[in-house]
Amino acid sequence: MIKMNKFSIFTRSVLLKARPAEVYAFHEDPRNISKISPSSLKVKRVDCSVPARAGEEFRLCLSQFGLPLEWVGFWEEATPDSCLVDGAKKSPFKHWRHAHLFTDCSGGTVMSDRVEYAMPLGVLGRLLDVTVMRLVFLVMFRARHRATKAFFAKTR
């Protein structure tokens, strides 16, 4: 994780045994979040349309660590088989931009997540960022990538 401007950046990649088109199709449907979320995140409702189109919104009603959370996201970019970028209109973050990048790799796909975010709460938020959030993102994306890898391994 590196600091740039006012935002923090988190990146993580995983090699999946699936073609980029399959991985893209899975990720353009926000309802699939329940298939890859760690146990601390409970998905209660997802409102979306598929396929993803730049400018379209999706809504998630969740609970994280038992706390209710409403997330209103939108697709900033939807380039089939290569890139999905979502932003947030309503979330716990002051700023959120999540790029899912899909790269063909010898019959598989390297999926990279790049999250650009800013915490609310000023100095307290920055303190939480450099302490707690680094661990939260690491644990969450490690679990998501493990579940995504298992999902595509089962579909083979």
Image (tube, rainbow, N blue to C red):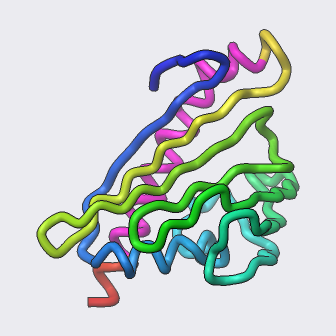
Judged left or right of residue 37, residue 74 is right
Judged left or right of residue 78, residue 14 is left
Q: Say whether residue 136 is magenta.
A: yes
Q: Nearer the viewer, residue 75 or 149?
A: 75
Q: Nearer the viewer, residue 84 or 150?
A: 84
Instruction: Report x, y in % for residue 9.
Output: 52, 30
Q: Nearer the viewer, residue 62 or 4?
A: 4
Rendered view: 3 above or below 36: above
Instruction: Report x, y in % for residue 72.
Output: 83, 58
Q: Which image quarter is the C terminus in? A: bottom left
| Magenta span of residues | 125-150
Quadrant housing residue 148: bottom left
| Residue at x 66%, y 72% (from the top left corner) | 53
Q: Nearer the viewer, residue 18 or 154?
A: 18
Quadrant housing residue 78: bottom right
| Residue at x 74%, y 63% (from the top left corner) | 55
Instruction: Report x, y in % for residue 124.
Output: 79, 14
